[in-house]
Image: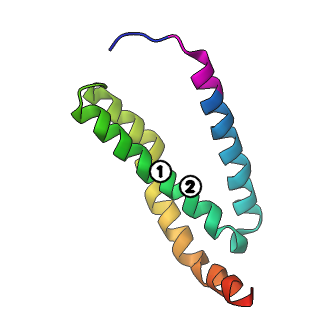
Amino acid sequence: MPLDNHPQIFACLGMVVGLYGVLYLEVARVPERGWLLAFVGLTGKILGPIGLIRLLLQGVWPPATLVLCLTNDFIWWLPFYFYLRAAWPYFRESLRAN
């Protein structure tokens, strides 16, 4: 895999990760209102590995990069799932109220 030098991509990625952190802080602060934010987070944690699988199958990235998904995506699936399941009644009620 050739080395690339595109620091702008990493600056943008850092900004996005930081913004997700602010959103997760809001979910932690008011858990009964965080369902949609957490759903977006879980969706990202699912789509990331799908994109990685595509890169692996095309031979663009080496198999060793799977460790990225283990440490950054897969470990969050169950916590997100349990939170979303517990918060769903509050979200559903807020939809009915509006």
Residue at the spot x=64%, y=61% of the render? 37
Of 83 and 94, nearer the camera is: 94
Residue 18 as seen in the image, left or right of residue 51: right
Residue 25 as seen in the image, left or right of residue 4: right
The percent position of residue 98, horizontal first and vertical second, equals 75, 85
Position of 9 relative to 39 (above/below): above
Name the main secondary structure of what is drawn in magenta: helix
Of 78 and 95, nearer the camera is: 95
Return the residue at label 2.
41
Residue 70 as seen in the image, left or right of residue 16: left
The percent position of residue 8, horizontal first and vertical second, equals 62, 20
Q: Distance from label 1 to label 2 (Cα)?
A: 6 Å
Return the residue at label 1.
45
Residue 15 as seen in the image, left or right of residue 61: right
Residue at the spot x=59%, y=24% of the render? 10
Position of 97 relative to 2 (above/below): below
Of the numbered discs in the image, which one, if any, rests on residue 98? none
Crowding at label 1, few (<14), some or many (≥20) Cα neighbours within 10 Å?
some
Residue at the spot x=69%, y=39% of the render? 18
Disc 1, disc 2: CB below 8 Å?
yes
Please say which color scheme the image uses. Answer: rainbow
Residue at the spot x=55%, y=15% of the render? 6
For the magenta stretch, what is the residue range?
5-11
